[in-house]
Amino acid sequence: MADTTMKKVNLLIPLFLLVINLIFSAFLIEELIDASEPNYGVTGLFTPVIGLISFIYIRKLEGKKKIFLLIVLQLFNWIFIIFPIAVFFYGIIIMVNY
């Protein structure tokens, strides 16, 4: 007899990581809106790290199942990974040109 146990999808952890990323992204966007020189520090790179952790967790969790919420969360994770890194390099380019 084949044992067909199905992993229960626990969405609490990815949603919690999404909320943390939204908070860190709000700080990053607030810093971008400010007219002074950018000073993100290390906290500006928390968002891509947490986004990568969430991306890997969802990737392992998802398997062959395609749940719409998980697809949307993966899209947000890509944004959380790429956007702060792009802003960081853009800030370096601006500082070098002065």
Image (tube, rainbow, N blue to C red):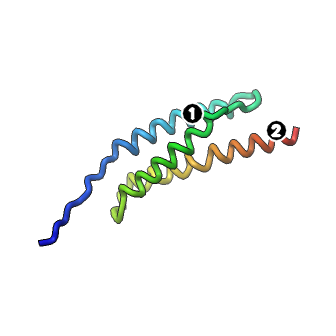
Looking at the picture, does residue 31 appear above or below residue 45? above
Q: Quadrant of residue 15?
A: top left
Residue 28 is situated, as x and y percent measured from the top left of the image, at 62, 34
- Do the numbered discs 2 and 1 sit on residues whose CB atoms are within 8 Å? no
Q: Label 2 to label 1, Cα distance in Å?
A: 23 Å
Q: Of the residues under marks 2 and 1, which one precedes in the sequence?
A: 1
Report the disc number at residue 95.
2
Furthest residue toward left: 1
**Residue at 59%, 31% in the rendered image:** 27
Identify residue type, mark 2.
Met
Residue 44 is situated, as x and y percent measured from the top left of the image, at 62, 36
SS for tag 2? helix
Report the disc number at residue 42.
none
Q: Depth-wise, is mark 2 or mark 1 nearer the camera? A: 2
Report the disc number at residue 26.
1
Task: Give the number of callouts.
Answer: 2
